[in-house]
Amino acid sequence: MAFEIGIGPNNRKSVYFDATVADGVACFSVYNHMFIPAHFGNPDAEYDSLMNGVVMWDVAAQRQVEISGPDAAHLIQYLTTRDIRKTTIGQGRYVPICNHQGQLINDPVLLRLAADRFWLSIADSDIELWASAIAAERRWDVRVFEPDVSPLAIQGPLAKELVADLFGVWVKELPYFGFKQTELQGIPLVLARSGWSKQGGYELYLQDGTRGVELWNIVKAKGAPYGIRPGAPNDLERIESGLVSYGADGRLQANPCNPFEISLGKLVDLNSTDDFVGKTALQKIKAEGAKRRRVGFVIAGAPVLAGQHSLDVKTANGKTVGVLSEFVFSNRFSKNIGVGMIAMDIGDDVVDLAIQLDGESRQVAVEPLPFSF
Protein backbone atom coordinates (compact mmCIF):
# COMPACT_ATOMS: atom_id res chain seq x y z
CA MET A 1 0.00 0.00 0.00
CA ALA A 2 1.38 3.40 -1.00
CA PHE A 3 1.29 6.33 1.40
CA GLU A 4 1.66 10.05 0.89
CA ILE A 5 3.06 12.76 3.14
CA GLY A 6 0.90 15.85 3.47
CA ILE A 7 3.11 18.92 3.16
CA GLY A 8 1.46 21.78 4.96
CA PRO A 9 2.21 24.83 7.10
CA ASN A 10 2.84 22.83 10.29
CA ASN A 11 6.06 21.39 8.84
CA ARG A 12 8.45 23.50 6.82
CA LYS A 13 10.45 22.68 3.73
CA SER A 14 14.22 22.90 3.76
CA VAL A 15 16.00 25.39 1.51
CA TYR A 16 17.41 22.26 -0.19
CA PHE A 17 13.98 20.63 -0.56
CA ASP A 18 13.59 21.15 -4.31
CA ALA A 19 17.13 19.93 -4.92
CA THR A 20 16.56 16.75 -2.94
CA VAL A 21 13.32 16.08 -4.81
CA ALA A 22 15.11 16.58 -8.13
CA ASP A 23 17.76 14.11 -7.00
CA GLY A 24 15.23 11.42 -6.16
CA VAL A 25 14.55 11.57 -2.43
CA ALA A 26 12.35 8.58 -1.65
CA CYS A 27 11.38 9.15 1.97
CA PHE A 28 11.09 12.08 4.36
CA SER A 29 10.98 12.24 8.12
CA VAL A 30 10.08 15.24 10.30
CA TYR A 31 12.64 16.88 12.57
CA ASN A 32 12.28 20.23 14.31
CA HIS A 33 8.96 20.73 12.47
CA MET A 34 10.77 20.43 9.14
CA PHE A 35 10.94 17.77 6.45
CA ILE A 36 14.29 16.01 6.35
CA PRO A 37 15.30 13.33 3.83
CA ALA A 38 15.39 9.82 5.30
CA HIS A 39 16.85 8.11 2.23
CA PHE A 40 17.06 8.34 -1.56
CA GLY A 41 15.81 4.87 -2.41
CA ASN A 42 18.97 2.84 -1.81
CA PRO A 43 19.98 2.92 1.88
CA ASP A 44 22.62 0.21 1.37
CA ALA A 45 24.39 2.25 -1.32
CA GLU A 46 24.15 5.39 0.82
CA TYR A 47 25.75 3.53 3.72
CA ASP A 48 28.54 2.26 1.44
CA SER A 49 29.26 5.77 0.18
CA LEU A 50 29.38 7.09 3.74
CA MET A 51 31.82 4.37 4.80
CA ASN A 52 34.00 4.31 1.68
CA GLY A 53 33.41 7.48 -0.31
CA VAL A 54 31.49 10.68 0.28
CA VAL A 55 27.85 11.70 0.77
CA MET A 56 25.93 14.96 1.01
CA TRP A 57 23.05 15.40 3.41
CA ASP A 58 20.31 18.00 3.71
CA VAL A 59 20.43 18.63 7.47
CA ALA A 60 18.74 22.04 7.42
CA ALA A 61 16.32 20.62 9.99
CA GLN A 62 19.25 20.84 12.40
CA ARG A 63 18.02 24.34 13.19
CA GLN A 64 20.12 27.10 14.70
CA VAL A 65 19.13 29.12 17.74
CA GLU A 66 21.10 32.36 17.82
CA ILE A 67 21.80 33.94 21.20
CA SER A 68 23.42 37.35 20.95
CA GLY A 69 23.77 40.51 22.98
CA PRO A 70 25.54 41.76 26.12
CA ASP A 71 24.30 38.86 28.28
CA ALA A 72 24.61 36.14 25.64
CA ALA A 73 27.50 34.37 27.37
CA HIS A 74 25.61 34.42 30.68
CA LEU A 75 22.57 32.79 29.09
CA ILE A 76 24.62 30.14 27.27
CA GLN A 77 26.46 29.30 30.47
CA TYR A 78 23.19 29.00 32.37
CA LEU A 79 21.56 26.82 29.71
CA THR A 80 24.31 24.24 29.31
CA THR A 81 25.99 21.76 31.64
CA ARG A 82 29.50 22.57 30.39
CA ASP A 83 31.82 25.39 31.39
CA ILE A 84 32.02 27.40 28.15
CA ARG A 85 34.19 30.27 29.42
CA LYS A 86 37.28 28.90 27.67
CA THR A 87 35.45 28.35 24.38
CA THR A 88 37.12 30.60 21.83
CA ILE A 89 35.68 32.33 18.77
CA GLY A 90 35.69 29.79 15.95
CA GLN A 91 35.38 26.84 18.31
CA GLY A 92 32.45 24.48 18.71
CA ARG A 93 31.41 22.44 21.73
CA TYR A 94 29.01 19.55 22.28
CA VAL A 95 26.79 20.90 25.07
CA PRO A 96 23.99 18.96 26.80
CA ILE A 97 20.98 21.00 27.87
CA CYS A 98 18.83 19.79 30.78
CA ASN A 99 15.63 20.85 32.49
CA HIS A 100 15.47 21.68 36.18
CA GLN A 101 15.05 18.00 37.06
CA GLY A 102 18.34 17.15 35.35
CA GLN A 103 16.67 15.41 32.41
CA LEU A 104 18.23 15.87 28.99
CA ILE A 105 16.10 18.03 26.67
CA ASN A 106 18.62 18.58 23.85
CA ASP A 107 22.27 17.90 22.96
CA PRO A 108 23.27 20.65 20.52
CA VAL A 109 26.60 21.75 19.15
CA LEU A 110 27.49 25.24 20.37
CA LEU A 111 29.31 27.56 17.94
CA ARG A 112 30.88 30.73 19.31
CA LEU A 113 30.88 33.29 16.49
CA ALA A 114 31.86 36.31 18.61
CA ALA A 115 32.31 37.22 22.25
CA ASP A 116 28.60 38.01 22.47
CA ARG A 117 27.16 35.83 19.67
CA PHE A 118 26.47 32.08 19.71
CA TRP A 119 24.59 29.47 17.72
CA LEU A 120 23.08 26.35 19.20
CA SER A 121 22.82 23.76 16.44
CA ILE A 122 19.99 21.80 17.96
CA ALA A 123 18.56 18.31 18.01
CA ASP A 124 14.81 17.74 17.81
CA SER A 125 13.16 19.94 20.47
CA ASP A 126 12.04 23.56 20.82
CA ILE A 127 15.11 25.10 22.44
CA GLU A 128 14.37 28.57 21.04
CA LEU A 129 11.24 28.70 23.21
CA TRP A 130 13.13 27.34 26.25
CA ALA A 131 16.00 29.79 25.90
CA SER A 132 13.70 32.76 25.26
CA ALA A 133 11.66 32.04 28.38
CA ILE A 134 14.70 31.68 30.63
CA ALA A 135 16.28 34.86 29.25
CA ALA A 136 13.08 36.82 29.89
CA GLU A 137 12.61 35.48 33.41
CA ARG A 138 16.18 36.38 34.36
CA ARG A 139 15.87 39.79 32.67
CA TRP A 140 19.04 39.36 30.64
CA ASP A 141 19.86 41.73 27.80
CA VAL A 142 19.95 39.19 25.02
CA ARG A 143 18.23 38.35 21.73
CA VAL A 144 17.11 34.76 21.08
CA PHE A 145 15.92 33.90 17.56
CA GLU A 146 16.25 31.52 14.61
CA PRO A 147 18.64 32.99 12.02
CA ASP A 148 18.64 32.31 8.28
CA VAL A 149 21.04 29.37 8.58
CA SER A 150 20.68 25.95 6.94
CA PRO A 151 23.38 23.28 7.34
CA LEU A 152 24.45 20.97 4.52
CA ALA A 153 26.66 18.05 5.55
CA ILE A 154 29.46 16.42 3.56
CA GLN A 155 30.56 13.17 5.22
CA GLY A 156 32.79 10.20 4.50
CA PRO A 157 36.50 9.38 4.08
CA LEU A 158 36.71 11.42 0.86
CA ALA A 159 35.01 14.46 2.38
CA LYS A 160 38.27 16.19 3.30
CA GLU A 161 39.62 16.10 -0.26
CA LEU A 162 36.32 17.24 -1.74
CA VAL A 163 35.93 20.15 0.69
CA ALA A 164 39.55 21.13 0.05
CA ASP A 165 38.71 21.27 -3.66
CA LEU A 166 35.76 23.51 -2.86
CA PHE A 167 37.43 25.90 -0.40
CA GLY A 168 41.18 25.35 -0.38
CA VAL A 169 43.65 23.22 1.54
CA TRP A 170 43.20 25.32 4.70
CA VAL A 171 40.12 23.27 5.53
CA LYS A 172 42.37 20.31 6.36
CA GLU A 173 43.83 22.26 9.29
CA LEU A 174 40.49 22.93 10.96
CA PRO A 175 40.33 21.08 14.30
CA TYR A 176 37.32 18.92 15.04
CA PHE A 177 34.38 21.22 15.86
CA GLY A 178 36.43 24.15 14.57
CA PHE A 179 34.72 26.49 12.10
CA LYS A 180 35.33 29.58 9.98
CA GLN A 181 33.18 32.21 8.28
CA THR A 182 33.79 31.98 4.54
CA GLU A 183 32.01 31.93 1.19
CA LEU A 184 31.66 29.70 -1.85
CA GLN A 185 31.18 31.42 -5.19
CA GLY A 186 29.78 34.41 -3.31
CA ILE A 187 27.47 32.32 -1.11
CA PRO A 188 27.96 33.24 2.58
CA LEU A 189 28.40 30.37 4.98
CA VAL A 190 30.17 29.05 8.02
CA LEU A 191 32.30 25.98 7.34
CA ALA A 192 32.66 23.61 10.28
CA ARG A 193 34.56 20.37 10.68
CA SER A 194 31.73 18.37 12.17
CA GLY A 195 28.86 16.05 11.35
CA TRP A 196 26.76 13.20 12.73
CA SER A 197 29.00 10.30 11.73
CA LYS A 198 32.27 8.73 12.80
CA GLN A 199 33.57 8.80 9.23
CA GLY A 200 34.64 12.44 9.29
CA GLY A 201 33.45 15.41 7.34
CA TYR A 202 32.22 18.99 7.31
CA GLU A 203 29.03 20.99 7.64
CA LEU A 204 28.29 24.05 5.50
CA TYR A 205 26.06 26.45 7.44
CA LEU A 206 24.42 28.33 4.57
CA GLN A 207 23.51 31.92 5.56
CA ASP A 208 21.28 32.82 2.62
CA GLY A 209 18.30 30.53 2.23
CA THR A 210 17.53 31.82 -1.26
CA ARG A 211 20.66 30.04 -2.50
CA GLY A 212 20.02 26.57 -1.14
CA VAL A 213 19.51 24.81 -4.47
CA GLU A 214 22.53 26.66 -5.89
CA LEU A 215 24.78 25.49 -3.06
CA TRP A 216 23.49 21.92 -3.34
CA ASN A 217 24.26 21.82 -7.05
CA ILE A 218 27.74 23.32 -6.62
CA VAL A 219 28.66 20.63 -4.08
CA LYS A 220 27.07 17.93 -6.26
CA ALA A 221 29.03 18.99 -9.35
CA LYS A 222 32.36 19.30 -7.56
CA GLY A 223 31.74 15.97 -5.84
CA ALA A 224 30.97 14.07 -9.03
CA PRO A 225 34.60 12.93 -9.59
CA TYR A 226 34.52 11.54 -6.03
CA GLY A 227 31.29 9.63 -6.65
CA ILE A 228 29.30 11.78 -4.24
CA ARG A 229 25.82 10.52 -3.46
CA PRO A 230 22.88 12.29 -1.78
CA GLY A 231 21.80 10.64 1.42
CA ALA A 232 20.68 11.28 4.96
CA PRO A 233 22.01 10.92 8.51
CA ASN A 234 22.58 7.19 8.70
CA ASP A 235 21.02 5.25 11.56
CA LEU A 236 22.99 2.08 10.82
CA GLU A 237 26.36 3.82 11.00
CA ARG A 238 25.38 5.79 14.08
CA ILE A 239 24.31 2.59 15.91
CA GLU A 240 27.49 0.76 14.90
CA SER A 241 29.53 3.77 16.07
CA GLY A 242 27.56 4.27 19.29
CA LEU A 243 26.68 7.90 18.56
CA VAL A 244 24.08 9.44 20.85
CA SER A 245 20.80 10.45 19.21
CA TYR A 246 18.56 12.67 21.34
CA GLY A 247 15.04 11.57 20.51
CA ALA A 248 15.88 8.06 19.35
CA ASP A 249 17.87 7.07 22.44
CA GLY A 250 15.51 8.95 24.72
CA ARG A 251 13.63 12.22 24.95
CA LEU A 252 11.69 14.02 27.63
CA GLN A 253 8.34 12.71 26.37
CA ALA A 254 9.46 9.06 26.02
CA ASN A 255 12.21 7.29 27.97
CA PRO A 256 13.47 10.50 29.68
CA CYS A 257 17.10 10.25 30.72
CA ASN A 258 19.83 12.30 32.33
CA PRO A 259 23.34 12.89 30.93
CA PHE A 260 24.92 10.31 33.24
CA GLU A 261 22.62 7.59 31.90
CA ILE A 262 23.10 8.44 28.25
CA SER A 263 26.94 8.48 28.42
CA LEU A 264 27.28 12.28 28.50
CA GLY A 265 28.29 12.55 32.15
CA LYS A 266 31.77 13.77 31.27
CA LEU A 267 30.11 16.88 29.80
CA VAL A 268 28.50 17.85 33.11
CA ASP A 269 30.76 20.30 34.95
CA LEU A 270 29.54 20.13 38.54
CA ASN A 271 32.76 21.76 39.80
CA SER A 272 32.04 25.02 38.00
CA THR A 273 31.29 28.02 40.21
CA ASP A 274 28.57 29.02 37.74
CA ASP A 275 25.03 27.83 38.18
CA PHE A 276 23.16 26.18 35.32
CA VAL A 277 19.71 24.72 34.77
CA GLY A 278 19.50 21.32 36.45
CA LYS A 279 22.77 21.61 38.39
CA THR A 280 21.26 20.85 41.80
CA ALA A 281 19.36 17.84 40.43
CA LEU A 282 22.43 16.53 38.63
CA GLN A 283 24.54 16.89 41.78
CA LYS A 284 22.02 14.68 43.57
CA ILE A 285 21.91 12.15 40.72
CA LYS A 286 25.70 11.87 40.66
CA ALA A 287 25.91 11.53 44.45
CA GLU A 288 23.26 8.78 44.50
CA GLY A 289 24.55 7.13 41.33
CA ALA A 290 22.81 6.79 37.98
CA LYS A 291 20.20 4.03 37.90
CA ARG A 292 20.82 3.06 34.26
CA ARG A 293 23.60 3.10 31.68
CA ARG A 294 23.60 3.28 27.90
CA VAL A 295 24.75 0.07 26.19
CA GLY A 296 24.68 -1.83 22.94
CA PHE A 297 22.55 -4.92 22.47
CA VAL A 298 23.00 -7.93 20.19
CA ILE A 299 19.70 -9.54 19.22
CA ALA A 300 19.66 -13.25 18.44
CA GLY A 301 17.92 -14.82 15.47
CA ALA A 302 17.18 -13.92 11.87
CA PRO A 303 17.93 -10.43 10.55
CA VAL A 304 15.51 -7.81 11.86
CA LEU A 305 14.01 -4.84 10.11
CA ALA A 306 15.25 -1.52 11.45
CA GLY A 307 13.01 -0.07 14.11
CA GLN A 308 12.56 2.34 16.98
CA HIS A 309 10.18 0.62 19.34
CA SER A 310 11.40 1.19 22.93
CA LEU A 311 11.10 -2.52 23.64
CA ASP A 312 11.33 -3.70 27.24
CA VAL A 313 14.40 -5.80 28.01
CA LYS A 314 13.44 -8.45 30.57
CA THR A 315 15.12 -11.18 32.59
CA ALA A 316 14.01 -14.82 32.46
CA ASN A 317 11.65 -14.23 35.38
CA GLY A 318 9.93 -11.37 33.58
CA LYS A 319 11.54 -8.43 35.38
CA THR A 320 12.07 -5.36 33.19
CA VAL A 321 15.68 -4.22 33.53
CA GLY A 322 16.20 -2.14 30.42
CA VAL A 323 14.90 -0.72 27.18
CA LEU A 324 15.96 -1.31 23.57
CA SER A 325 15.35 1.99 21.82
CA GLU A 326 16.62 1.41 18.26
CA PHE A 327 17.92 -1.61 16.36
CA VAL A 328 19.01 -2.74 12.91
CA PHE A 329 20.72 -5.61 11.11
CA SER A 330 24.39 -4.83 10.42
CA ASN A 331 25.90 -6.46 7.33
CA ARG A 332 29.26 -5.20 8.52
CA PHE A 333 29.05 -7.27 11.70
CA SER A 334 26.55 -9.90 10.44
CA LYS A 335 24.50 -9.32 13.58
CA ASN A 336 21.32 -7.65 14.77
CA ILE A 337 22.48 -4.74 16.90
CA GLY A 338 20.78 -1.99 18.85
CA VAL A 339 21.22 0.65 21.52
CA GLY A 340 19.37 1.31 24.72
CA MET A 341 19.55 1.41 28.51
CA ILE A 342 20.19 -1.26 31.11
CA ALA A 343 19.98 -1.15 34.90
CA MET A 344 23.32 -0.42 36.57
CA ASP A 345 23.27 -3.72 38.48
CA ILE A 346 23.14 -5.75 35.25
CA GLY A 347 26.62 -6.65 34.03
CA ASP A 348 27.89 -7.11 30.49
CA ASP A 349 28.06 -10.88 31.05
CA VAL A 350 24.32 -11.33 31.75
CA VAL A 351 22.87 -14.27 29.79
CA ASP A 352 19.12 -14.35 30.48
CA LEU A 353 17.82 -11.20 28.78
CA ALA A 354 15.11 -11.17 26.12
CA ILE A 355 12.75 -8.89 24.21
CA GLN A 356 9.39 -9.49 22.53
CA LEU A 357 9.64 -8.56 18.85
CA ASP A 358 6.67 -9.09 16.52
CA GLY A 359 5.22 -11.66 18.90
CA GLU A 360 8.47 -13.61 19.14
CA SER A 361 10.85 -13.84 22.10
CA ARG A 362 14.42 -12.93 21.13
CA GLN A 363 17.44 -13.37 23.35
CA VAL A 364 19.62 -10.27 23.71
CA ALA A 365 23.15 -9.78 24.96
CA VAL A 366 24.76 -6.63 26.33
CA GLU A 367 27.67 -5.23 24.30
CA PRO A 368 29.87 -2.18 25.03
CA LEU A 369 29.66 0.79 22.66
CA PRO A 370 30.91 1.40 20.05
CA PHE A 371 30.40 -2.07 18.62
CA SER A 372 33.61 -3.91 17.86
CA PHE A 373 33.49 -7.63 17.18
Image: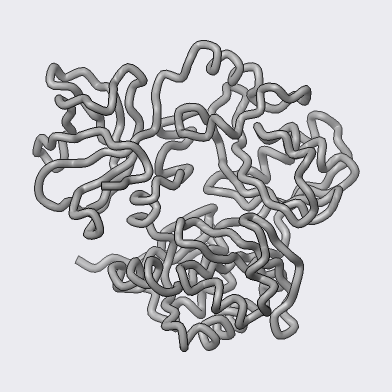
Outermost residue on the top side: it is 288
Give the image quarter of residue 125: top right
Q: Is residue 61 visible?
A: yes
Of residue 309 and residue 168, the one placed in the foreground of this image is: 168
Position above or below: 55 against 246: below
Q: Is residue 13 visible?
A: no
Image position of 75 (left or right of 24): right
Work out whether 143 lies above or below 140.
below
Seen in the picture, residue 266 relative to 344 is either above or below; the reply is: below
Task: List x then y, in percent, for residue 259.
Answer: 52, 30
**Residue 155, percent across and down?**
49, 67
Asked which quadrant contains residue 330, the reply is bottom left
Q: Which residue lies at the image location 29% right of the left edge and 43% below the top edge?
A: 338
Q: How is the image coloured?
A: one colour
Give above or below for 170 relative to 361.
below
* Quadrant holding the N terminus: bottom left
Q: Is residue 340 left or right of residue 95?
A: left
Please provide percent x and percent y for residue 253: 45, 34
Residue drawn at x 60%, y 44% is 126
Q: Residue at x 35, y 49 (%)?
A: 239
**Could you tell me which residue is drawn at 46 percent across and 33 percent down?**
262
State the residue in front, 77 or 1. Answer: 77
- In the image shown, does 95 or 53 lie closer to the viewer? 53
Apparent side of residue 317 relative to residue 161 in the rendered image (left or right): left
| Residue 188: x %, y % from top left | 74, 74
